[in-house]
Amino acid sequence: MDFKIPKPEARISKFEKLGYGMFIHWGLYSQLGQGEWIKNFKKTPKEEYAKLADTFNAEDFDAKEIAQIAKAAGMNYIVLTTRHHEGFSLFDTQGLCDFDAPHSPAKRDLVAEFADACRAEGIVPFFYHTTLDWYQESFKNNFDKYLEYLNKSVEILCRNYGEIGGLWFDGNWSKPDSDWKEEELYAIIRKYQPEAMIINNTGIKNLGEAGNIEIDSVTFEQGRPKKMDRRGMKKYLAAEMCQTMNHHWGIGLHDFCYMSPKDIIENLAACRKVGANYLLNVGPTAEGKIPGYEREALLEAGNWVKRYADIIYNAKPTDILGSGKDFALAMAGKLYLFIHDLGVGGDDNVTISNTGSGIRTFANLNKTVKAVRWLDNDETLKFTADSDAGILAINATGFPYGYNLVVRVAEIE
């Protein structure tokens, strides 16, 4: 067996350094406020559901504002649902179908606005495009004809919106026994967007599963990624976890179960621990605005990302084993320890708990350790190291009162 790890192609290395991105699920379903699958779950007739296009105005969709939020949150790319399973397109389909934003009251090519705004803010635009379609009758009755429609739609996205970071597909799992003729679809992308990432989501049940040779990254939907074993792979594949902030991809007006900034920070750290990207979803309102809580949670977590941005984007996973959730990344000859669940110091009358600080151990560290310090305040930490045994033990002091970074990073020299 070949145990050699293939070298990543340039676009894949670039993608891995992006590290953290925003997913946007927005469409006609947003007007109903019950998630992106509501048509399917309620078995709404096609003709009735299509009437939602008559009230789709996008009056609050400000692509520049969204790109600025992503940037402030520490995100480097955004994936927009140019067309979801409902079949409605946010872009000008140029005569392929009039079920699109330019034919709605919005009367705008929203994908064009999105792509331009992203580039203006230094954000890389990615396009999500469904492969499953509940609107096109050919999806059920004439699959070859449907694939022709799909390919022409993707060609429009590849030709008319400048350079993009990639295409993000979802839906092949809906017809597992059909011939999707993926080679034809991916050839279109390689022709017009040779440096674009190609991602095709395998779904919740197939986390990390590889597919066609043209695929550049595996996906982990709603599940933390595991470290990938790339030995013997025909091609180096990136990895990406996509996740919702609540339990819906499209806005859920009755869903109050949201992640906190703490959750976001811990999930991002868990992804970077294994070298995977983190793609975190927001569900804009019917009119196209990111809801207030989601915006603020992203910005709050973004303050943490800014502290450690260079490490988050550029450091690489290591084989060093930490206790519990702790782990180490490597960059430019230095090691960085990510320490979880530290306590906050202070008087017993005001602190909730002083637990969580103390000795943290790491194994497989076969280097001489000269010093260990917290990056946030330059505090030097006491440590004991045995390079022959590969063991490091540090006295991880708790946060000073007024601080709690959730995950604290120490630098080893």
Image: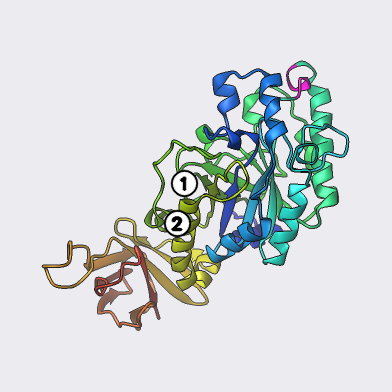
Q: How dense is the environment of label 2, judged by Cα within 10 Å: few (below 14), some, or many (20 and up)?
A: some
Q: Is residue 50 above or below residue 204?
A: above
Q: Residue at x 83, y 39 (%)?
A: 93
Residue at the spot of label 1? 245
Find residue 297 and name its label: 2
Q: Is residue 160 above or below residue 326?
A: above
Is 115 placed left or right of 263 in the picture? right
State the SS at label 2: helix
Amino acid type at mark 1: Met
Question: Mainly helix, strand or loop, the magenta region?
Answer: helix
Amino acid type at mark 2: Ala
How far apart marks 1 and 2 lie (CA) works out to 9 Å
Q: Quadrant of residue 100?
A: top right
Q: Nearer the viewer, residue 149 or 314?
A: 149
Q: Is residue 138 magenta?
A: yes
Q: Residue at x 81, y 48 (%)?
A: 158
Q: Residue at x 57, y 29 (%)?
A: 37
